[in-house]
Amino acid sequence: MKKIGFIGLGNMGMPMSENLLDSGYDVYGFDVNHEAETRFEKAGGQVGRSMDDLAKSCDAIITSLPSVEAYESVYLGEDGLIRNSHKNILLLDTSTVAPESNKKVAETAEKYEVRFLETPVSGGVVGAVNRTLTFMAGGPKPIFDEASALMHVLGEDIFHIDERIESGTLSKLINNLFIGFYTAGVSEALALAKKQNMDLDALFDVLSVSYGQSRIYERNYKTFIANDEYDPGFTLKLLRKDLNFVKETMTREDLHLPVTDVLLQVYEEAEQAGLGPKDMAVLYEHVGKQDIS
Ligand code: NAD
């Protein structure tokens, strides 16, 4: 497997595709944003080929896309991957998408006899840069086994959740529900500490060895809040998107999770306040402004 297409050269896709280049693969990038393609070309990648051309000529194509609309158009569109792929290709999607949408793509791929695997990732941009991503794959084990070498180029912990389509996506959504809770918890706890004029650095040292410690506290505080700098990272709007998928899943299963409902509302409000394009850690700034007076 030598020729790899990479579709979606954003915060995650760019470092992943650069790592493939560094590992000696021929990588063909595609993005609707031409600035992203230019950056990839400068990094040594090849650009300028259409999606259907990539589908006809690559050994594998990896996607990292920001929305259900983008995901469905890339996989299901007339000039998209499934309709145009040759029979030996491997299609891997690392985006976080709605389970229903993922199922639709997987079933269409099966119908067209194209090998597709959902392989959502966790670990953020740092994980994408450092090749320490966690992969949560769901779908046929033989396809997982074949895709495994490629995932090992990009990540550290590679899991096959089970044969069920959706199992990778559901694992990822549950991960992001935790992230939503932790980020809200860090934001509100630190807003309270700040209001009480506490030294947040000193507090971090204490809580790092207490049960208040979490990877999200460390990430959100050390990288973003302490530096008053919220360039993503993982945007608040992407996390809100994933919480919407959680909500859709809850509704489908007729499950009422009251705190999750409030959580989604908090992120929606922060997005409406214009914070969507910033890193999710910016929720701290948003809740800090919620004075009653
Ligand atoms: P991003 O918005 O930075 O990048 C997405 C890229 O896809 C952009 O460059 C955009 O121009 C491109 N794109 C949009 N529509 C397209 C289309 N139709 N065809 C080709 N390219 C298209 O998003 P990101 O942070 O890189 O996240 C990508 C996916 O990975 C999302 O589903 C996200 O939920 C998931 N994810 C992100 C992180 C993170 O920390 N950022 C971590 C794990 C998973």
Image (tube, rainbow, N blue to C red):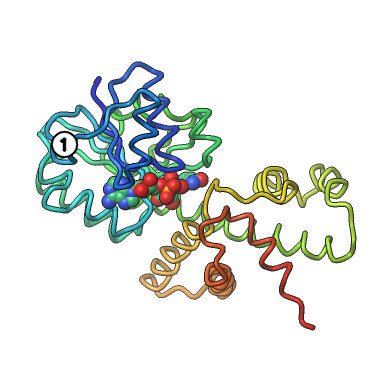
Amino acid beneath label 1: Ala
Q: Position of residue 152 (x, y in %)?
A: 41, 26
Q: Is mark 1 within 8 Å of ligand 1?
A: no
Residue 120 vs 6, above or below: the answer is: below
| Residue drawn where x is 32% and y is 42% of the image | 34
Residue 176 vs 45, above or below: the answer is: below
Residue 62 vs 153, above or below: the answer is: below
Element under disc 1: helix
| Residue drawn where x is 70% and y is 44% of the image | 218
> Is residue 282 among the parts visible in the rendering?
yes
Q: Quadrant of residue 219?
A: top right
Q: Nearer the viewer, residue 273 or 264?
A: 273
| Residue drawn where x is 54% and y is 58% of the image | 236
Q: Nearer the viewer, residue 100 or 3?
A: 3
Q: Position of residue 230 (x, y in %)?
A: 62, 51
| Residue drawn where x is 42% and y is 25% of the image | 19
